[in-house]
Amino acid sequence: MTRFSVAFAILFLTGFLNLKAQVSPDCSNAVPICYNTPINGGTNGYGIDDFYGSSVTGCIAQATAPIESNSAWYRFRTGERGQLGINIGFDISEDWDFALYRASDCNTLGDPIRCNYFDNSDNNTYTGFGVDPTGADNFQYDDWLDVESGEDYYLFINNFSNNNSGFSIQFSGSIFIEFPNTALDCSIINNLLGPPIAACDDDNVVLDATTLGAIDYEWFLDIGNGYQQIPAENSSILTVAVSAMYRVLVIMPTGDNTISEVQVAFSPVPTTAQISDELVCLEGAPIDFTTKRLEALGVQSANEFQVNFYSSLDDAINNINALPDVFIPTMASQTIFVRTTSVQNQKCFDVSKSFEINGLEVPGLNFATSVYICEDTPIATIGERIPNPNYSYSWDSGQTSSQITVTQEGTYTLNVSNTFGSQNCTTERSVTVVFSGQPVITDVEISYQDNANTVEVIVERVGELEYQLDGNPSQKESIFYNLSPGAHTVTVSDVNGCGSISEDIVIVGFPKFFTPNGDGVNDFWTVGGMSVLHNPVVHIYDRFGKLLYQLRENDPGWNGTINGVLLPAADYWFKLTYADSEGGTVTAKYINNHFSIKR
């Protein structure tokens, strides 16, 4: 067992010392405490009302009775400057409140500077200010307190639940690391033998009653049955090894003898059991230290000893920066230091054991998750180009190499494993293979409605395509709306860079039939939207391909005759030509060129 003077907690909850614990229900008789005083006790009602009928003090309010239900009062004085915390331990079934006052007189307490009244719905084992020593995210904790040397404080502890199995008080904070022996001023305890002593089982505790002019000393011991004289102990000093109340009678030649008493409490010294190393995957998955805590305790009781984990020996010795129970390893090799501490007295601890966390690397995969092949011959090589000889590879298609060649579109998944002993760290990565090519336009469907025209582009295959009209921004949809009549260019492009195709189209409108019967209604067949074209000509044919009529831009329309002779009711065909920007003649594509005469 290794022991150092550092920040500590003093806990006594059971047995003889619980019976002898110093508890005062009144502020005026508050028990003075300092760094080495064992602080524990239970409460049973209260004395005088220290709040004189007030309904509230800080966060603690009156219920059906005065503010105090079952109270205990303590006082202490700071001996140094620094950060101070207090942990009040209790049974999870009980409801304890506290308030801390910076004051030197019970009549001028003022408002508390730290206060907590929350019930224990989370089943915590501590309340106080600073940090819960178990590492719990505890709303029953207030912030650390920064103190100056020579400040006086009163601590009020109240049991609201009436269930009473006792409480303990432990001090914490950097002030006890920097000034382990003078953090609190022990001069407020005026006693020949000094303040009560909290010691570990292997400590050498010497009581010194040396008094100038004394002619004899008599020593007494009380282990719970009253004081009994210790035979043959007449020296001014006494070495003690058991928990008890000790009394010395200092005999003076004048008869003005002195009696002094002191409490000495020994706490068990923990022994940390051997702890097994851990082998884990370095993938951000946590380790639960709960099982490691059971290993460290061995046959020792979790009610008597507390186990915490640290990333350095100094942190373990100083009891700072404890690691969370759910710990995420980040290094290939890391030493975790274990501190096993007596619950009764945190000065009694063991930091002799540690264990290793060895992290097994999780395979990293860098190949593309999408592969597009534009070539005429569909073949692709996918996967990890440079294999790691320490890894094993397995594709869902059955191959066991890091790379494979495929000739079919689809999604292929690779599992890569790094195995050591029984530990297997695996990474999975899928790649989608698409064999693509230049788009092919099979049709363009045009719906004419003046300036609300619609064009839908029909392609040979469905894929990752983009559609563009007249150089405007591309779109995913194959339909264009609200287009003006006239000549347009539609372009279809493969988004993966496998080419594009463009088609010139003309948006014009024509009736599917007309009735040239001389009634003045629908007697002429015309094509709308021709005016936006340059030199447009509509060529009308019969079913044998004979040219019947040529309809030009300013022509009122065709009346269904040839050389003045009425043509029969039948189907007729047409094509549209116009001049392009270079003066060449262009025949419009994708126009439904079939209409009928009805008589």
Image (cartoon, rainbow, N blue to C red):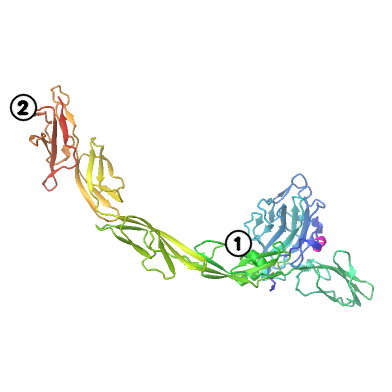
Q: Which residue shows up at 47% across the image and 65% down it?
A: 362
What is the C-alpha distance between the residues marked 2 and 1? 102 Å
Q: Is residue 1 left or right of residue 491?
A: right
Q: Is residue 53 magenta?
A: no
Q: Residue 498 appears in which quarter of the rendering?
A: bottom left
Is residue 22 positioned above or below 561 on the image? below
Which residue ends up furthest to the top in the rendered image? 519
Residue 175 visible in the snapshot: no
For the image shown, how many numbered marks are present on the structure? Answer: 2
Our reading of the magenta stretch's main secondary structure is: helix
Q: Amino acid at mark 1?
A: Asp
Mark 2 or mark 1: name the one nearer the start of the chain. Answer: 1
Assess disc 1: are there few (<14), some (14-19) or many (≥20) residues with their C-alpha within 10 Å of its C-alpha: some
Q: Which mark is residue 371?
A: none
Q: Could you tell me which quadrant the N terminus lies in?
A: bottom right
Secondary structure under badge 1? loop
Q: Which residue shows up at 61% across the image and 67% down it?
A: 310
Secondary structure under badge 2? loop
Residue closer to the observer: 538 or 50:
538
Give x and y (percent) for residue 2. 68, 74
Question: Which range is magenta?
Answer: 16-20
Q: Which mark is residue 564?
A: 2
Give x and y (percent) for residue 225. 88, 64
Q: Which residue is mark 1?
A: 325
Q: Could you tell me which quadrant the C terminus lies in?
A: top left
Q: Amino acid at mark 2?
A: Gly
Q: Which residue shows up at 17% across the image and 43% down it?
A: 589
